[in-house]
Image (cartoon, helix red, strand yellow):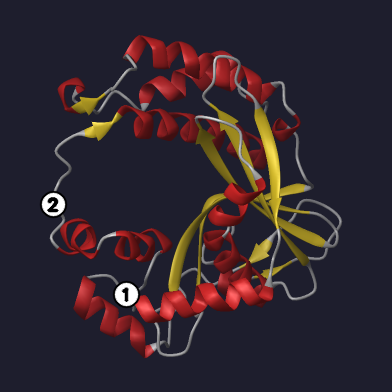
Amino acid sequence: MIARLATGAVSEMSGPASVSVSVNPVSVNPANQAAQNLIGRPYLSWSAVSTFMQCPLKFKFRYLESLPEETLSSSLLFGSGIHQALEEFFRAELAGGSKPTLEKLVYIYRSTWLPVDPEAVSFGSDTRESLDRLAVKVLRAFLASDSAGLLGHVLGVEEEISGLLVEGVPDLLGRVDLVTEEKDSLTITDFKTSRGKWSADTVEEASSQLLLYSSLAGAFSPKKTIRLRFVVLTKTANPTVEQHFAEINPQKLARVKKIFERVW
């Protein structure tokens, strides 16, 4: 359990990792109340900040006026389904249970489509049937890959991480796909589905969010090396699963924090 990680302290025990956290931590950051008054939430998220950078009007529609999307992208639903299946896989590992079978993971993937009106989905060149077949291949490739193994002990799956990044700016609240702990390190993992393999430039471009999370993780676990990892599952005819580690560059981290501040 690593909810609200910024308030916890990672154990140094050699057994399964544990975190001591406050159940209901109270933030003393005065900017959080300003955010509550302005945007209806006492924090900022990376998705909100990046949306504002892309298009302030889109930010307004989504985060201030809560306008519903007219259509849903089939690619987005596909990625969400794969993500839910991987979450179940690592939750079983965290609980010490048996690993889900391919059939179980496919069932979870399909379940994410159930609440969605088929008429509201924009498929492009895909069909629901073709995406279902692709999901089976992607999940099979994952189970056969090194990424289905572990880098140490599972510390948390889909858990919140929050804390102060910049004085005068509301706390960052994020959700971490997977955190694993080894004796001297923590690895923060983000799962991605992609139409093709990632290049080094793609990893660099995608690393801003995890860099901010690493800054928060370093505050509660200063003695451990933080590693940032992307697990990329390609949506190709023959899916691949690749691991990419992003560099924690202090200069880039400072730039990303400055962007965070300027957006606020």
| Image quadrant where one finds the C terminus | bottom left
Please state which amino acid type lies under the numbered disc 2.
Answer: Leu
Q: Is residue 162 above or below residue 87?
A: below
Residue 102 found in image quarter: top right
Q: Residue at x 35, y 86 (%)?
A: 31
Residue 96 in view in this figure: no
Q: Is residue 186 above or below residue 153?
A: below
Residue 67's disc number: 2
- Residue closer to the observer: 240 or 116: 240
Residue 42's disc number: 1
State the CA–CA distance, disc 1 to disc 2: 20 Å
Q: Residue 222, percent across and down?
A: 74, 76
Q: Is residue 28 above or below residue 103?
A: below
Q: Residue 238, percent across and down?
A: 60, 15
- Residue closer to the observer: 93 or 74: 74
Q: Is residue 169 above or below residue 218?
A: below
Residue 262 located left or right of residue 93: left
